[in-house]
Amino acid sequence: MSEQFDWDVVIVGGGPAGLSAALNLARARRRTLVLDSNRPRNSATFHSHGFLSRDGISPLELRKMGREELEQYPNVSFERTIVESIQPLNAAAEMDTASASAAVGAGFTVTHRGGAVTTRTVLIATGLREVLPKLPTLRAFYGTSIHSCMECDGYEYADKPIALIGHTDDLAERALLLSQWSRDLIVFTQGVGHVSDADEAMLAERGVRVDRREVADVAGDRDGLNGVVLADGETISREAAFVRPDYETALDFAAGLQLALDAEGLIVVDAAGRTSTAGAYAIGDATPPGPQQLIVAAGDGAEVAAVINRDLL
């Protein structure tokens, strides 16, 4: 069966989730191709945290090390390219996830800018794109003193003046979590984000302020962020900020798979990473609940690799 296809598995996305899956599939002697556009969501981040034995490593360095490890295995190949489409070789490949393993051999054609290949299975590990608040100077400090992941970067700003800038309805919950690292915290709702009176009172008990005025920009210098600029002209001194981005998937290439998506546009998967299309799997940030730490994504990759290996039997 496997000789009919160029690859046993094609993985779209070479982040921690995709590379971890590739490593485990390589060790299972599965012929595996990794296709990656080299456009990671965290490319502006200098340090990632919480990854055992790699705390503080650059996300780009982590990816580089992962690719170097894969080079040891002759049954794995890595290509830097953009995937354009994935099409089932047989329409019968589309069925419910309970029947996925039975039809995994139907196969797919994966077309990318370097050519086209056939594969028994595909694994989508493309992650998400961040849509940051539209503040003119934000990107100058993003990844250094402005961040989106509190669990990743909150520790470095313990007890320092911090801003939380956002427009979503979960600002109070995020502020409560961020106050674990610093109570010198101001939540900027920009007049849009919802923080109820009860939530504001709860936060005030922890020393957290809520400012509902519009944010015009951020300010800083070579040493990093030093303030949040409001539309009325006032600048409020802050040493760091956390933003609540919007997230969007980049799944146009997978349209031919007719994957089931949830209300947030994330790929619906079962507990084993199987999608609604037999032989197609998904892991990482593009699946519910969305953005997660690198070590969690890597763990997901190892788990789904084991499932794919068994399904291929």
Image (tube, grey):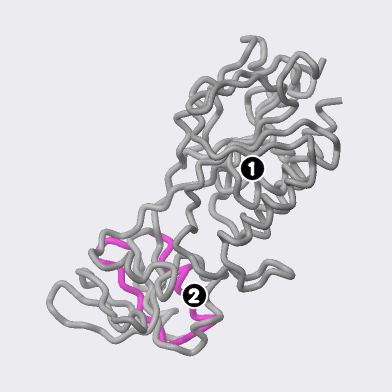
Residue contact at pointers 2 and 1, CB within 8 angstroms: no
Closer to the eye: label 2 or 1: 1
Q: Considering only order in the chain, which callout, 1 or 2, is on the residue closer to the N terminus?
A: 2
Decide if residue 51 is on the left or right side of residue 85.
Answer: right
Q: Is 11 situated above or below 254?
A: below
Dot 1: what SS? loop
Mark 2 surroundings: few (<14), some (14-19) or many (≥20) residues within 10 A: some
Residue 222 picture location, percent across and down: 33, 81
Q: Residue at x 46, y 86 (%)?
A: 183
Q: Is 261 situated above or below 115?
A: below
State the mark number for residue 176: 2
Q: State the residue position of label 1.
A: 283
- Classify residue 275 by image quadrant: top right
Q: Residue at x 81, y 32 (%)?
A: 30
Q: Residue at x 61, y 60 (%)?
A: 293
Decide if residue 262 is on the left or right side of residue 103.
Answer: left
Q: Which residues are magenta?
A: 169-194
Q: Is residue 177 magenta?
A: yes
Q: Residue at x 61, y 69 (%)?
A: 57
State the mark number for residue 111: none
